[in-house]
Image (cartoon, grey):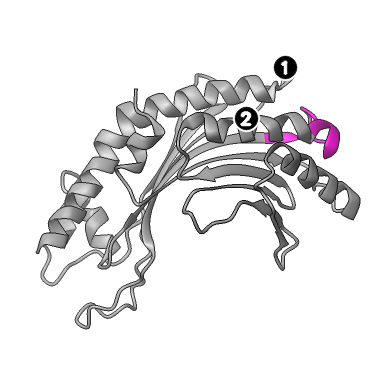
Amino acid sequence: MMTSNSYSSLCDDFYLDMYINTELDLPTERDTILSFFERIQRQFPSMGRFYRRENNEYYLEEDRNPGQYRWVSLEIDRVGSGVVNPSDFEMAYCLDRLVLELVPYMLGVNHLDIDSLDVTFAMDFDYAGSHDEVIAEALLAQSAFNCLLDLPSARPIGFSPALVMALSDDDRTQGRISIESKTSVFEPKKKGRFTDDAISLSFTVRQYPATDEKFEALKSFEHQCRLAEELMAEKIVPNFVQPLTEIIAQKRLT
């Protein structure tokens, strides 16, 4: 079984995130918001950076400078939590569990209000060149789309593939894999000016509540984590991550 350190060795940054997506808008009262984040800080005292974005999204984070940090967000209709470059899975999961335990009585999010629950494994790959070309060479070579690149002067300038798949018979458990290029079609190739952003890969296991039973968020979270870990190790890393890292390594040598 792969560990968090195994993933970190394959990419430049590794993220383990959870989102609770709600049907109704979340509370906006000052006392409610501050009490929620204060309770989290009590458990994780190093999370001392609190701020609000212009769209009234609220964040509590650790210091980002060391390259590893926890964060919790409160948005209009979702609550998020996660760890950037966690030392192990449990470092992220214990924060997620705390958020799941707090939202029912501190934010009024009960089982009826949960639209879906997401567990996401994400990875960034730094590359100062055409992201589209890397993704196409790594993932498109054996597909029918590759024949289009045989055309004169053809080269990929917009390629960010994504796939959503059902992981259960009732379609309520779903997986989503996406690879995002940050290269703009307007970036001039001849001058070698490319974005400093990274190629991003994310894999999400989403669970929708069933209509005939009470949704147990913590129980679902544990199941989704196990499923995400299994699919990352058996499917995503060998078939998506490793081809990307191999092509990036080859291009850096040329």
Disc 1 residue type (three-letter)? Asp
In terms of depth relative to the viewer, which is nearer, 183 or 64? 64
Q: Give the left or right position of residue 151, taking residue 129 as reference.
A: left
Disc 2 residue type (three-letter)? Tyr
In terms of depth relative to the viewer, which is nearer, 167 or 34? 34
- Classify mark 1: residues with Cα within 10 Å, few (<14), some (14-19) or many (20+): few
Q: Secondary structure at mark 1?
A: loop
What numbered label is drawn on residue 78?
none
- Where is residue 114, by image quadrant? top right
Residue drawn at x 73%, y 40% is 40
Q: State which region is magenta.
A: 104-115
Q: Which residue is mark 1?
A: 212
Q: Which residue is mark 2?
A: 208
Placement of 142 over or under 214, stated as above or below: below
User: Could you say where residue 215 lies in the image, as x and y percent from the top left?
Assistant: 71, 22
Residue farthest bottom in this picture: 191
Residue drawn at x 25%, y 34% is 238
Quarter of the image for the C terminus: give it: bottom left
Q: Give the left or right position of residue 109, taking residue 146 as reference.
A: right
Placement of 233 over or under 164, stated as above or below: above
